[in-house]
Image (cartoon, rainbow, N blue to C red):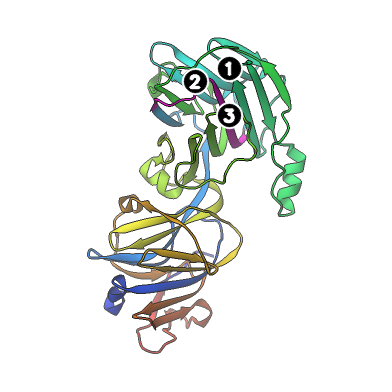
Amino acid sequence: MSPTWAVAAESDLAALAVDARVTAEVRLRPHTSVVPVVEYRSARGRYGLLLDPVGALPFLRAKPRQWVMAQNLADFPPRAFTAVFDLCPLRGDADIVLFSYAVPGDGTVLALRERLDGGLTLEVAGERVSFGKSLDYAQWQRLAVSWDATTGETLLYQDDGIARVTAEAEGRSPSPLADPIARQVVARGARLPGGGAFAVGQYQGQPGDPGLFDLGRGLRGSVAEVDLWADAAGPTRRPEWTGTPTPGAVARWRFTATGLRTQETPGAATAYLGGFGPDDLRDVRAYRVIVTWGGRAWGARTLLPVGGAHRLECASAPELLVDGRPVPLDPVDAADLGRPEVPGFRIGPLQDVAEVRLHHDGRLHRSFASARRQGDLLPDLTGHGRHLLVRS
């Protein structure tokens, strides 16, 4: 069934852009583009509740090369790090590269890859060590590696594939990656220089130059999360992801529909995307709620997982409540949300939005319920306004 929307011309709904409260009852189903739950748009103003899907990037094409990359990392951790991935790798005809870090004059000084002849391998400062373990192909998994220059100890962490699949099928969170599955020693006493480029999915010939990626090495599969910490404490006991910088985090990247549109993903270090189109988001698991008011926008710090039903409420303060509880907001560049294509008011998809109420000056102004649809019309239940037109 194709999505349907309830729409209207500007009419008196434009007044709500000044002082209003918007409430929506929604069920979160997976969509790969931004969901405008309720939105008014015009050249003079804008307000509404949007859902920005958070999902995975598919590294599937040999050409054009695909990558996620942050450059000029002056604060790259020189003596210890922990890198954490959530990915679903696929077999290919080249060495799999999870990440590489390259600096001017030295080339790649750090990389995690799976060699065709040796399993998962960590390269640090010109030295290399194999963990004797392999990726689980065609299966979602968390993978983490840590390194401490003081001892040279490097630890590898990986999901138990069967346990993770079972947990997700039963609606439970996977067990934390508390215990390493392999331990090695490499590059004791080494120091990693700062100012380089960190690339996900590619092995760099020169720092930050996509034209010099090693064509014999790369990533095939999907990546949903990348975290890089400035210590060797491992992947557990880390704070939940938010859209704002986290203490101790060099990078925390999640991939959203708005990020694909702008070809970047913000965080402690902004990463730029290459080779991905605006419709390439896959495996949507959660949404970030975005509040728009006037020429400004804010994003919720916490994510809402797909599958649940929630009551969203926002006001022009700005303020956001999810199921009656306030949620912290951080500013978002409103330009990232795109310019209005057609001025007007819309609700939808109606398959996901059960009810919308608009308050103005402390009073109920308009009320719409998907279950009260009458053919191609969605009536205003207050009896004071025009009906909305239902469009596919």
Q: Can residue 136 be seen by looking at this rendering?
A: no
Circle 3 packing at 10 Å, graded few (<14), some (14-19), many (20+), is many
Disc 2 from disc 3: Cα separation: 12 Å
Image location (x, y in percent) of residue 210: 40, 24
Q: Position of residue 254 (x, y in %)?
A: 50, 43
Secondary structure, mark 3, is strand
Residue that mark 2 sits on: 78
Q: Amino acid at mark 1?
A: Ala
* Nearer to the camera, 77 or 83: 77
Which picture quadrant has residue 143?
top right
Alpha-carbon distance for marks 1 and 3?
A: 12 Å
Mark 2 and mark 1 residues within 8 Å of each other at the beta carbon: yes
Which range of residues does the magenta coloring cover?
72-89
Residue 169, percent from left and from top = 73, 51
- Residues at marks 2 and 1, CA–CA distance in whole angstroms: 8 Å
Q: Which residue is mark 3?
A: 82
Residue at image location 76% in from the left, 42% down from the top: 163
Above-or-below relation of 369 to 332: below
Residue designated by label 1: 149
Q: Amino acid at mark 2?
A: Pro
Residue 322 painted magenta: no
Q: Would you say the magenta stretch is mainly helix, strand or loop? A: strand
For marks 2 and 1 on the same chain, the one whose residue lies earlier in the sequence: 2
